Image (cartoon, rainbow, N blue to C red):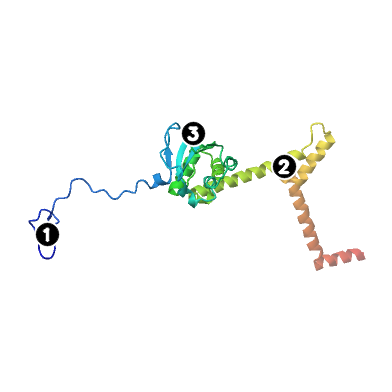
Amino acid sequence: IPRDGGLHPGHAHFRPCSPWRPLPPGPVAPPSIKGIYYRRARKVGAPAASPTGDLKKEMLINVGGRRYLLPWSTLDEFPLSRLSKLRFCRSHEEIAQLCDDYDEDNQEFFFDRSPSAFGVIVSFLAAGKLVLLREMCVLSFQEELSYWGIEEANLEKCCLRTLLRKLDERAELRREEARQRQRDARRPAAHTSRWGLFMNQLREMVENPQSGLPGKVFACLSILFVATTAVSLCVSTMPGWRAEEENVSEL
């Protein structure tokens, strides 16, 4: 062995450092990050299968027949979620307020909710990305988010804009329905006399210009009368017009 501690060329473990030396067979794979999602949430197989996991560190959830193992540590970032609140339950009564059923033997929580929507929510809990479910109504998915205690602000920007647009459309539809109910309430009953029917139509024409052609005509005439009155008042204040009125009064 040389004095510098290195290996001489004849040593059994010596390898040349030339760039032209042959590479080992097969590609060198980069370090894999597979398993991060699995450690944060994973789906369990058939309902009859016994999950392999430490139920002291993980919770077993059954949503619409689909079972998931979710580590309690995954829920640390979402303390206000429904699943996170189960962690602090100390009695069956408290658990019953948060889930639909509970199997004490298997320590399994049952929820009678949409499994498809919960699959998206589990993906968000594990990967941190929340999107809308394409095959589900946007407003129904909002109800699922509210049930599970997930804030809408966690949605991706494009999905959040879609949700806000649908909420505005629903609010406008409800306002239109309220206006329609008010109009229906003002309509006369079936046994009302002809005079009562005429008065109701007249009231509708005066109060609501959008009620039909008579309402629009009445609104235009009202504007015309107001404009004519305003012009007459302005003209009557002119000096020339006053002089003519005084001459007429002297005669």
Mark 3 or mark 1, which has the lower sequence index? 1
Q: Residue 156 placed where, x, y %?
A: 48, 50
Looking at the rendered image, the disc whose residue lies closer to the viewer, 2 or 3, is 3
Residue at 89 percent across and 63 percent down: it is 248
Q: Quadrant of residue 251?
A: bottom right
- Any part of residue 7 in sight: yes
Left or right: 116, with 31 as reference point: right
Can you say whether 224 is above or below 194 in the image?
A: below
Instruction: Assign a secondary structure to mark 3.
Output: loop
Left or right: 191, with 46 as reference point: right
Q: Quadrant of residue 208?
A: top right
Q: What residue is pinned by disc 1?
A: 7
Looking at the rendered image, the disc whose residue lies closer to the viewer, 3 or 1, is 1
Left or right: 32, with 129 as reference point: left
Q: In the rendered structure, are the residues bearing label 3 and label 1 in contact, judged by CB atoms less than 8 Å apart? A: no
Q: Nearer the viewer, residue 216 or 152?
A: 152
Residue type beneath disc 3: Gly
Q: Nearer the viewer, residue 175 or 77?
A: 77
Q: Mark 2 to mark 3: distance in Å?
A: 53 Å
Q: What residue is pinned by disc 2?
A: 211
Residue type beneath disc 2: Ser
Can you say whether 184 is above or below 230 in the image?
A: above
Can you say whether 143 is above or below 18 in the image?
A: above
Q: What residue is pinned by disc 3?
A: 65
Q: Mark 3 to mark 1: distance in Å?
A: 64 Å
Instruction: Assign a secondary structure to mark 2.
Output: helix
Mark 2 or mark 1, which has the lower sequence index? 1
